[in-house]
């Protein structure tokens, strides 16, 4: 069975919308340093491949209910810089937004972090879905999908070109001879495209990994094409195994069409496991998380204006096709009520039963709040014991549905630690994840592996070296 790539998608206050309310959970971002430190320690001990940090370039009261982690969080480059100094082996991936970032500044920061971390940095390039970001970067509007991706394509090219400014041996540092730099091995960037123009060269040495591994996350057709053409890891949103298989096949076909070895594109799915000592225990945790979800009808008058529309009984009524007027969120669901539900509504009831163990007509029947929670939390969840969750991951690996998972934790630190110390050993037992010492270090070279090496990706050759070898033409780059 192929080896899974397993990374943690770090959300310091938890990835489930009500995770921060869970007893004992970390909830104040002013204390993030301690949680990041602890997460990194546990992740490194477990041998995870990387820690992944998403990003969001604006904030507002509405996010409190939609996704509280977006309200205020550590900047991802700062997070991985901090972690580079206190970890040794684990990969560190930060998200950057190509619509608003400056490529020179980003190439410089990321090349620096790659050097500081010994080749463990990675970069998730996204084009952004938050329109308010425009105002924060001096722009009048958030560009449309096509324009964002046109800029993203240039961004990827210019980043690589900047990282190739110095050939690997450009700094001679010959103290005796008094020669510091071989000027023939320092190259201008000279990128002049429609969206970006950079002269270069970059004032940072070439990253240890040559180019940082590039992740791309998105959902639109342009996003899939971008991932297929330029990314090493495609982070996709999937609702289940079959959809993942289909997307992976599509992405690999697109990569092949783009002239790539399609095996170099790894498809990664986000997943939110709820880990318990037994399945019943995991269901109790999922149940409590659902009960901590606020819905619009919890406010006696009206919810805050920023409250998301889909977190309400009114919205649920549309999904299940039954008038819920006058019912309270904690009203138990009865067989009579469900009889009138749409197939989608009935499916929601089944999802709630699977996640929480609550049965209609049982001692603790599901409530309308459980249904709102299931309908409004889009993350793909697996609820069970460590062995059950590992078996589910292995089934995905066996079906070649994904190359790996970005694991979200509902609460920090408890659910992350339950995954790292419980599920990861089970994945090893099933043979889908390597032993720490087998993959984390290169004994022959006497050093730890770079993130690229861990992910099974080759180190890209410098474009200027390739040109000298006659592989292809270089010179002034016109996008
Ligand atoms: C699993 C996943 C995680 C993502 N994480 C982020 C993120 O942290 N920050 C961000 O700006 N965009 C993120 N995105 C991408 C945005 O959703 C994307 O930029 C936006 O949807 C616009 O691109 P699209 O229309 O091509 O999907 C993520 C996408 C997926 C599928």
Image (cartoon, grey):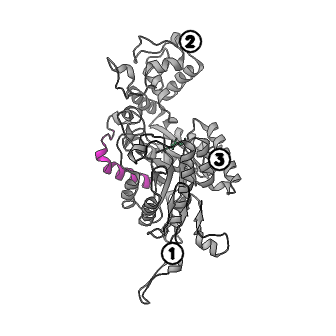
- The answer to whether residue 178 is left or right of residue 155 is left
Q: Could you tell me which residue is drawn at 51 percent across and 51 percent down?
A: 125
Q: Are marks 1 and 3 in contact (CB under 8 Å)?
A: no
Residue 251 marker: 3
- The residue range painted magenta reads 25-45
Can you give x and y, in whole percent of width and height, for residue 398 in the image? 64, 45
- The vertical placement of 375 against 325, above or below, is below
Q: Using a 10 Å C-alpha cutoff, classify the residue at mark 1 as few (fewer than 14 neighbours), some (14 to 19) or many (20 or more).
A: many
Q: Main secondary structure of the magenta part?
A: helix
**Mark 3 packing: few (<14 Cα in 10 Å), some, or many (20+)?**
many
Q: In this view, does 237 lie above or below 403?
A: above
Query: Where residue 127 is drawn, which disc sits there?
Result: none
Q: Residues within 10 Å of mark 2 (few under 14, many from 20)?
A: few
In what element is the residue under mark 2? Answer: helix
- Residue 287 appears left or right of 465: left
Q: Which of 20 and 122 is in front in this view?
A: 122
Residue at label 1? 186
| Residue in the image at 44% along x and 17% along y | 363
Q: Which of marks 2 and 1 is nearer the N terminus?
A: 1
181 relative position to 2: left or right: left
Q: Residue under circle 2?
A: 339
Q: Residue at x 44, y 31 (%)?
A: 286
On screen, 100 above or below 338? below
The quarter holding residue 116 reads bottom left
Of label 1 and label 3, which has the lower sequence position?
A: 1
């Amino acid at each position: 069975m192929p080896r899974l790539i397993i990374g943690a998608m770090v959300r310091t206050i938890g990835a489930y919308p009500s995770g921060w309310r869970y007893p004992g959970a970390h909830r104040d971002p002013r204390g993030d340093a301690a949680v990041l430190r602890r997460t990194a320690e546990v992740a490194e001990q477990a041998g995870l491949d990387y820690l992944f940090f998403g990003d969001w370039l604006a904030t507002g009261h509405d996010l409190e209910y939609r996704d509280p982690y977006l309200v205020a969080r550590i900047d991802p480059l700062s997070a991985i810089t901090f972690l580079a100094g206190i970890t040794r082996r684990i990969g560190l991936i930060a998200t950057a937004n190509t619509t608003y970032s400056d490529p020179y500044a980003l190439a410089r920061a990321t090349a620096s972090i790659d050097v500081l971390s010994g080749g463990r940095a990675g970069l998730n390039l996204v084009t952004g879905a938050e329109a308010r970001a425009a105002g924060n970067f001096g722009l009048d509007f958030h560009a449309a999908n096509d324009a964002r991706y046109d800029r993203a394509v240039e961004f990827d090219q210019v980043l690589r070109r900047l990282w190739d400014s110095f050939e690997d041996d450009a700094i001679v540092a010959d103290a005796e001879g008094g020669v510091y730099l071989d000027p023939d091995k320092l190259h201008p960037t000279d990128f002049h495209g429609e969206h970006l123009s950079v002269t270069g060269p970059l004032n940072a040495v070439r990253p240890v990994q040559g180019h940082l591994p590039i992740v791309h996350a998105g959902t639109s057709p342009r996003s899939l094409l971008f991932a297929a053409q330029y990314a090493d890891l495609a982070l996709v949103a999937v609702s289940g195994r079959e959809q993942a298989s289909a997307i992976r096949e599509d992405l690999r076909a697109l990569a092949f069409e783009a002239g790539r070895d399609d095996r170099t594109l790894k498809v990664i799915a986000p997943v939110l496991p709820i880990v318990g000592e037994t399945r019943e225990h995991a269901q109790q945790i999922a149940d409590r998380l659902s009960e901590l979800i606020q819905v619009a009808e919890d406010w006696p008058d009206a919810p805050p204006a920023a409250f998301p529309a889909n977190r309400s009984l009114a919205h649920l009524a549309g999904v299940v096709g039954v008038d819920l007027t006058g019912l309270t969120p904690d009203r138990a669901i009865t067989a009579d009520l469900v009889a009138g539900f749409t197939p989608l509504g009935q499916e929601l009831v089944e999802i709630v039963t699977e996640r929480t163990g609550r049965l209609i007509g049982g001692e603790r029947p599901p409530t309308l709040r459980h249904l709102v929670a299931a309908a409004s939390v889009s993350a793909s969840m697996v609820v069970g014991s460590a062995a059950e969750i590992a078996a589910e991951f292995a089934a995905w690996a066996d079906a070649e549905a994904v190359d790996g998972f970005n694991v979200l934790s509902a609460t920090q630190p408890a659910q992350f630690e339950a995954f790292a110390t419980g599920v990861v050993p089970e994945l090893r037992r099933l043979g889908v994840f390597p032993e720490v010492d087998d993959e984390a270090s290169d004994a022959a070279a006497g050093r730890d592996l770079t993130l690229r090496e861990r992910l099974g990706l080759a180190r890209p050759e410098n474009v200027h070296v390739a040109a000298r070898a006659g592989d292809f033409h270089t010179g002034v780059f016109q996008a």
